[in-house]
């Protein structure tokens, strides 16, 4: 049943318009310079995240696994991560905890990308439905992950007929998990964004990083509407949540030392550059990677090469030779209210 749900999610994302509202990045500007004082061919995209070296500040956001189709997509995505030295998250591994024979649909990522930075993934609410530290550790060990993503998807669970909606007492369990799990824990939203209050709670709970995953990308209310709920219910929440740029600014202001991932509607090198200038360490992308991977390895390679070239050109045009330079660039609001 969960496997069919996963394939439904993939199919709907590929066949339907599941985009939500604005990310908020259009309200920010990176100031162009006519004198960049750097060489485009020497732009360095390398960075580190949670102590792990990456060739570019990019994450293939968690998407799939748990079916034969998911395995094929994970294989292609992992190959891209391996080739370009970027990070990758797998989809929720809950299904593999319930059916061990499906573990290989996730393990394929590590097989294809033996030296890549991989993130395991489980729904945070599952801590209230019988899953504990040993299960989380098993998810990490399954793909030899460098960190565990716990995703928070309250709206999506509320719209699923079979959704798990008991989020009571979850923060305390998260704190216990962070204190005992050997791998770092990344808290991730799935399209509604984190608020400043959320950030304070997550910092106190001991998470190692936060993926804001704000509004502006894939709307899971629309996805669930197409899958099982009356579509009218899904459309009510199409634009629900904190836009990605706003969530990023709020969380960074509240937790300036916390490693952050900006995801939710990131679609270009310009979006990535703005994210890093606004305080993110990485930018995460899902739907465009899925669309390319569903076509072929070649389409995925072409998309990724274009994206990274685009990022380098943006950095060149603002005079940022490296990712550390980019983090110091002023990203201003279009009303000229500077945020840094």
Image (tube, rainbow, N blue to C red):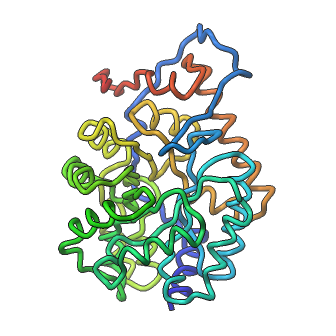
Q: Quadrant of the C terminus?
A: top left
Asked if residue 253 is positioned above or below residue 324 in the image, the reply reads: below
Residue 245 in the image: x percent, y percent? 37, 42
Asked if residue 212 is positioned above or below residue 14 in the image, the reply reads: above
Asked if one can make out residue 91 in the rendered structure from this viewpoint, the answer is yes
Identify the residue at horizontal 65%, vertical 77% (top origin). 105
Asked if one can make out residue 232 in the rendered structure from this viewpoint, the answer is no
Locate residue 30 relative to residue 66 in the image: left or right: left
Identify the residue at horizontal 56%, vertical 61% (top origin). 145
Asked if residue 218 is positioned above or below residue 1 in the image, the reply reads: above
Residue 32 in the image: x percent, y percent? 52, 17
Residue 168 in the image: x percent, y percent? 18, 75
Locate residue 123 relative to residue 78 in the image: left or right: left
**Image quarter of residue 231:** bottom left
Residue 215 in the image: x percent, y percent? 37, 54
Locate residue 261 relative to residue 315 in the image: left or right: left
Of residues 271 and 180, the one drawn nearer to the viewer in this rendering = 180
């Amino acid at each position: 049943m969960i496997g069919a749900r996963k394939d439904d999610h993939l199919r709907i994302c590929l066949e339907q318009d599941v985009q939500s509202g604005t990310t908020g990045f259009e309200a920010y500007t990176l100031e162009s310079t006519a004198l960049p004082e750097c060489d485009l061919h020497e732009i360095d995209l390398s960075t580190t995240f949670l102590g792990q070296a990456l060739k570019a500040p990019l994450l293939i956001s968690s998407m799939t696994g748990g079916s034969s189709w998911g395995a094929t997509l994970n294989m292609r995505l992992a190959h891209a991560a391996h080739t370009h030295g970027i990070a990758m998250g797998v989809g929720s591994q809950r299904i593999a905890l319930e059916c061990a024979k499906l573990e290989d649909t996730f393990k394929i990522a590590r097989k294809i990308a033996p030296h890549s930075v991989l993130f395991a993934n489980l729904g945070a609410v599952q801590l209230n439905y019988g899953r504990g530290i040993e299960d989380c550790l098993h998810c990490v060990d399954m793909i030899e992950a460098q960190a565990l993503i716990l995703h928070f998807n309250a709206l999506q669970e509320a719209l699923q007929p079979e959704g798990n909606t008991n989020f009571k007492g979850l923060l305390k369990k998260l704190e216990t998990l962070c204190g005992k799990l050997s791998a770092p824990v990344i808290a991730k939203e799935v399209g509604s964004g984190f608020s400043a209050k959320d950030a304070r709670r997550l910092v106190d709970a001991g998470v190692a990083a936060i993926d804001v995953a704000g509004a502006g990308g894939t709307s899971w209310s629309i996805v669930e509407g197409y899958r099982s709920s009356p579509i009218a219910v899904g459309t009510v929440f199409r634009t629900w949540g904190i836009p990605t740029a706003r969530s990023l600014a709020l969380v960074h202001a509240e937790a300036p030392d916390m490693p952050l991932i900006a995801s939710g509607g990131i679609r270009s090198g310009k979006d990535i550059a703005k994210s890093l200038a606004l305080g993110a360490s990485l930018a995460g992308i899902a739907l465009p990677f899925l669309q390319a991977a569903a076509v072929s390895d070649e389409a995925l390679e072409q998309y990724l090469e274009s994206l990274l070239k685009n990022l380098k050109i943006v950095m060149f045009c603002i005079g940022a030779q490296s990712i550390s330079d980019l983090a110091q660039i002023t990203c201003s609001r279009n009303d000229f209210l500077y945020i840094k």
